[in-house]
Image (cartoon, rainbow, N blue to C red):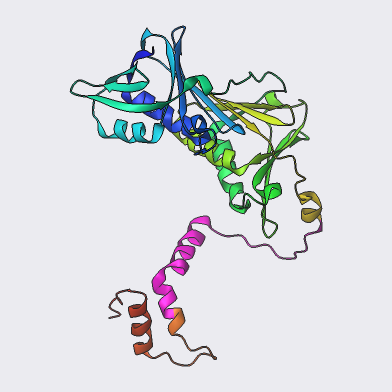
Amino acid sequence: MLNVKVDRKEILKAIQIVENSVTDNKIREVLSGIYIEAKENRIILKGTDLELSINTEISGEINSEGKIVIKHKLIEEFLKQILDEKIELIEEQGKLIIRTDSTNTEFSLYDAENYPTQSRFEMGVEYTFDKSKLLTNIENVKISASNDPENLAVNCIRLEIEDNKLKLVSSDTYRLTYIEEELEENQRNKEGLSVSIPLKTIEGLIKIMKLIDEETISFKSDGTRVFFKFANVEILTRVIELQFPDYKSILKNAQHDKKILLNTKDFLKGEKYIRHPLTKAFWRALPQNDFEETDMEDIRLQCKKLNLELPSLE
């Protein structure tokens, strides 16, 4: 029976990392939880939906080895509420007891014997990237990816390595975003790579990269799966094998004869004002034909409809 003593903040962070691969599963309920195993001086946390798997390890004092599958949402909220630095996780009669200095709180569990085993990923050429730079590029390219899981071919980010460049592409068939970056010297002249990584994996990867302190991330692929690794976090995901749009032809044939150079700060400041609801009120109040004088009462009326207080113009 599992019995371990761990740092509350450390296990909370581990749960927040692993839960990015977990979804509610009515058919196989055990997949709705997070697997925790204590063995050989290691405390391992795992989550999977069979398409995406995330593993991590934490330190702790193991009094008794064992394995459990927790209903993590309730436990996560509980860990956020208490202030104890150290807590004990104790499995008793099919229940989990979390023991603190002042309380014993009981939680139900899934059957750990029904949790699927995971095979090790060993294949593929390994690449290593600066985490901060990769995070910025992924967040920037993600904006054009389709959010529709039914449209699998573009519900992803395309990652390619060729000609000693990392290329990231997304498209929802209406927009296309493309970023390329030269590989570091020690990453050049390796085997190329071309995979479509599901958007769900990308979103989980972004959250994890923001949670952890490591400066680098490594990954490799066998063409059907991609394996990401930090110091103590492993992410294994299936790729989307449907054909991604021919973005190279689109970029090659794009017709444009003008370029605009913008100051980023000024542009974002202007965009903020354009999207402000007060701007919408003034715009709706304007006459729809030519540039006739606008009645101030119309502006007040539109502000009232939008529950906005009209600022003083004096």
Query: Residue 254, position in %: x, y?
Result: 77, 60
Q: Would residue 300 be found to the left or right of residue 182 on screen?
A: left
Residue that protrudes farthest toward the bottom in the picture: 292
Q: Residue at x 26, y 26 (%)?
A: 105
Let me know if residue 274 is in the magenta part: yes
Q: Please state the total of marks drawn on the protein image.
A: 0
Q: Main secondary structure of the magenta part?
A: helix
Residue 43 sits above or below residue 285 on the image: above
Which residue is at 50% across, 33% downward?
Answer: 29
Measured as percent of width and height from the top left, residue 17 is found at 46, 31
Q: Please state the horizontal and vertical placement of residue 256, each as a whole percent of the image.
A: 75, 64
Q: Quadrant of residue 87?
A: top left
| Residue 244 part of the magenta segment | no
Q: Nearer the viewer, residue 282 or 265?
A: 282
Q: Quadrant of the N terminus?
A: top left
User: Splitting the image into 4 quarters, where does residue 261 fall?
Assistant: bottom right
The answer to whether residue 80 is above or below residue 231 is below
Q: Between 15 and 131, which is closer to the camera in this rendering?
A: 15
Query: Percent from the top left, x then y, of residue 184?
Result: 66, 29
State whether residue 245 appears in this view: yes
Whether residue 231 appears in this view of the structure is no
Placement of 265 over or under 110, stated as above or below? below
Vertical placement of residue 93 versus 74, above or below: above
- Which image quarter holds the C terminus? bottom left
**Segment colored magenta:** 253-282
Between 28 and 221, which is closer to the camera in this rendering? 28
Q: Residue at x 29, y 75 (%)?
A: 309
